[in-house]
């Protein structure tokens, strides 16, 4: 599994040759567990129930990447008429695994601040995160190109479509929630005004006569 980090090309080639759903789901599950552990080992523990938050975060990211895989598979199939859910899931899981592992490592490194100083720790964690982001995006693109048997340009277009659709959907969802909340607030305000008006209309309850 960790060959995705130290030997990504071999890991991608093996995933293309073997096509193991079991390994792909294991990679995604491990990355989700790593993500859930980050708030648990973080020094800034401000959560009232860190275990619940960790489980919720891990499960949420697991589901999100399954959805991403399905969307990527759909877009790539429309564009190239090649690939399936396995290709989308492996593409999503491999890049996610690199990021999750690197964030967990940098969280552990933060414990070294009292011993080696804040500046060296910050430099090391920053370098690790920069390298991990680069590797994650590169591995994601390379995995999609190899598994979907497509070109890099088509893969980039497909990912732009997927992430644009997600951003728009999230924006619409938040906008509807906001508008719905404002509507509920207006309804409560109207009820309150009606109640005050009804009370003031009772005999002897209007201070102005």
Image: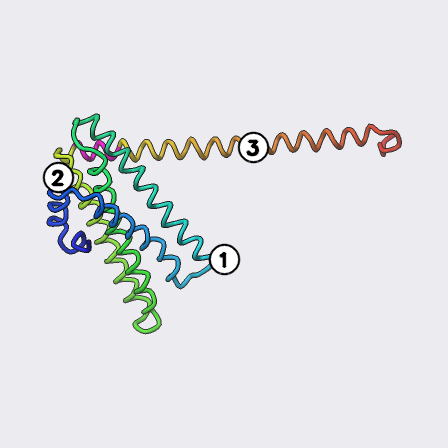
Mark 1–mark 2 distance (CA, rounded to whole Å): 44 Å
Quarter holding the C terminus is top right
Query: Measured along the vertical axis of the image, is residue 51 above or below residue 69?
Result: below
- Residue sitting farthest toward the bottom: 115
Q: Is residue 83 magenta?
A: no
**Magenta segment boundaries in residue numbering:** 154-160
Residue 209 appears left or right of 40:
right
Mark 2–mark 3 distance (CA, rounded to whole Å): 48 Å
- Assign a secondary structure to mark 2: helix
| Label whose residue precedes the other's in the sequence (1 or 3) | 1
Residue 131 appears left or right of 193:
left
Q: Residue at x 18, y 46 (%)?
A: 139
Q: How is the image coloured?
A: rainbow
Residue 186's label in the rendered image is none
Residue picked out by circle 3: 182
Q: In terms of image quadrants, where is residue 122? A: bottom left
Residue picked out by circle 2: 146
| Label whose residue precedes the other's in the sequence (1 or 2) | 1
Which-is-in-front pick, marks 1 and 3?
1
Mark 3 surroundings: few (<14), some (14-19) or many (≥20) residues within 10 A: few
Which-is-in-front pick, marks 2 and 3?
2
Q: Residue at x 34, y 34 (%)?
A: 166
Q: Position of residue 208 (x, y in %)?
A: 85, 31
Mark 1 surroundings: few (<14), some (14-19) or many (≥20) residues within 10 A: few
Q: Residue at x 41, y 49 (%)?
A: 56
**Magenta part, dominant SS:** helix
Q: Residue at x 27, y 37 (%)?
A: 69
Residue picked out by circle 1: 48
């Amino acid at each position: 599994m960790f060959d995705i980090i130290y030997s990504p090309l071999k890991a991608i080639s093996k995933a293309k040759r073997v096509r193991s759903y079991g390994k792909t789901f294991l990679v995604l599950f491990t990355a989700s567990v790593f993500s859930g552990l980050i708030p648990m080992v973080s020094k800034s523990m401000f959560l009232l129930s860190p275990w619940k938050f960790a489980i919720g975060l891990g499960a949420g990211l697991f589901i999100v990447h399954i959805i991403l895989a399905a969307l990527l598979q759909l877009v790539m199939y429309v564009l190239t008429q090649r690939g399936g859910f396995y290709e989308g899931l492996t593409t999503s899981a491999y890049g996610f695994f690199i990021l999750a592992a690197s964030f967990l490592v940098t969280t552990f490194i933060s414990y070294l601040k009292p011993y080696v100083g804040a500046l060296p720790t910050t430099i090391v964690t920053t370098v690790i995160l920069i390298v991990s982001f680069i590797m994650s995006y590169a591995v994601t693109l390379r995995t999609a190109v190899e598994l979907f048997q497509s070109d890099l340009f088509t893969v980039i277009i497909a990912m732009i479509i997927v992430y644009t659709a997600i951003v728009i959907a999230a924006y619409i969802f938040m906008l509807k929630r906001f508008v719905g909340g404002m509507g509920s607030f207006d309804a409560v305000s109207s009820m309150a005004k009606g109640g005050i008006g009804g009370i003031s209309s009772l005999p002897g309850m209007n201070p102005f006569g």
